[in-house]
């Protein structure tokens, strides 16, 4: 069994992005800029936004966080996004999800200019990914693909079983793997006999948000297991969706939690923001 070390790879990518941001500054006399919109006081969301801000600082990016109260109106959020769309110091706009229930998330995501959509959630970029065109790809599944590439794991022709079908994890993961010529299956909460599907897989990618969802008897000998889940266990530890201690010895490769997919997500946010800045050039 070999660990897929997302922490080390993320560090390597961050160093490369930092260098490219410096070159970009020399050429354009400005630095890549990221605006984050954070609504409400969800502790996990605040922690994620804090990590993203620190990563921007390390890479030499400009970043600004718009913190808004839980009861903010949809119109006020839209107004702020429109301001960021027009702001020449901002290359990327990130809406930290989830938004409160009185806000129409789809509507909000559609206001973000597709050229600043560094999370890849705008239908324009979703469509480009689905058709295999260049665009912005959601950071978490993009990070998984980078991790596979780093370890020379080519999904081409492999049976990939994705567990979880959200717009931010499972669906874009499926599109990326399909574009890489894998055979892709997507399982979700209504899938009958999950084990039947995971047992047939060469690569299992799970992002469901359920502790110990993937157990030892659901994984075939030598499979590759990518754990995208991030959950807080009752003792306070961060754990994934895989029963790690029991599953790991059966696998050929596995991602740890923490230190696997999580750090890659932040590295890809930096990389997407740099890409947006390079696309914008001197003038946003
Ligand atoms: P979500 O709630 O939007 O979607 C969960 C998906 O899992 C749904 O499609 C649901 O049908 C499926 N699912 C739930 N329970 C299931 C079960 N028992 N069997 C099979 N399928 C089941 O969640 P999300 O936003 O996609 O996040 C999923 C997980 O990934 C969470 O743990 C989240 O914290 C984590 N996550 C991690 C990163 C990262 O950077 N590593 C980024 C985003 C999300």
Image: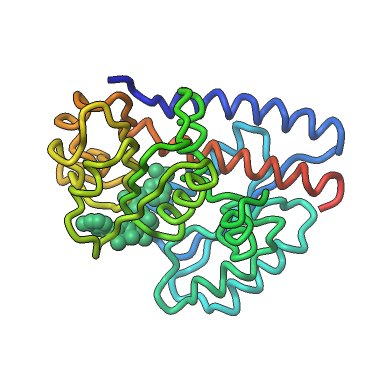
Q: Residue at x 19, y 32 (%)?
A: 247
Q: Position of residue 3 (x, y in %)?
A: 34, 23
Q: Residue at x 41, y 45 (%)?
A: 183
Asked if residue 128 can be seen in this view, the reply is yes
Query: Residue 192 is drawn in which quadrant?
Result: bottom left
Q: Is residue 129 above or below residue 216?
A: below
- Extreme-top residue of the structure: 2
Query: Residue 253 is drawn in which quadrant?
Result: top left
Q: Nearer the viewer, residue 60 or 272?
A: 272
- Extreme-front residue of the structure: 157
Task: Report the colour scheme.
Answer: rainbow
Q: Residue at x 58, y 28 (%)?
A: 13
Left or right, 260 with reference to 50: left
Q: Residue at x 20, y 26 (%)?
A: 250
Q: Is residue 249 above or below residue 160?
A: above
Left or right, 66 with reference to 238: right
Q: Is residue 19 above or below residue 81?
A: above
């Amino acid at each position: 069994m070999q660990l897929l070390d997302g922490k080390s790879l993320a560090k390597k990518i961050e160093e490369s992005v930092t260098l490219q941001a410096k070159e970009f500054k020399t050429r354009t006399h400005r630095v890549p800029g990221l605006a984050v919109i954070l609504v409400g006081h969800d502790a996990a969301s605040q922690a994620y936004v804090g990590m993203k801000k620190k990563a921007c600082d390390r890479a030499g990016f400009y970043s600004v966080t718009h913190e808004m109260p839980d009861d903010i109106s949809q119109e006020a959020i839209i107004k702020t996004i429109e301001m960021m769309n027009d702001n020449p110091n901002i290359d990327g706009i990130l809406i930290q999800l989830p938004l409160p229930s009185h806000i129409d998330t789809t509507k909000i995501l559609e206001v973000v200019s597709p050229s600043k959509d560094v999370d890849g959630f705008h239908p324009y970029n979703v469509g480009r990914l689905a058709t295999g065109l260049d665009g912005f790809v959601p950071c978490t599944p993009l990070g998984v693909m980078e991790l596979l590439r780093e370890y020379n794991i080519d999904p081409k022709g492999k049976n990939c079983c994705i567990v979880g079908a959200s717009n931010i994890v499972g669906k874009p993961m499926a599109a990326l793997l399909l574009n890489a010529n894998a055979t892709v299956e997507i399982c979700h909460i209504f899938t009958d006999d999950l084990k039947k599907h995971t047992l047939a897989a060469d690569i299992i990618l799970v992002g469901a948000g359920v502790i110990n969802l993937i157990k030892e008897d659901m994984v075939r000998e030598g499979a590759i297991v990518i754990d995208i889940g991030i959950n807080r266990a009752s003792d306070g530890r961060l754990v994934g969706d895989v029963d790690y201690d029991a599953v790991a010895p059966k696998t050929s490769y596995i991602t740890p939690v923490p230190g696997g997919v999580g750090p890659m997500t932040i590295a890809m946010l930096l990389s997407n923001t740099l890409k947006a800045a390079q696309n914008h050039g001197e003038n946003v």
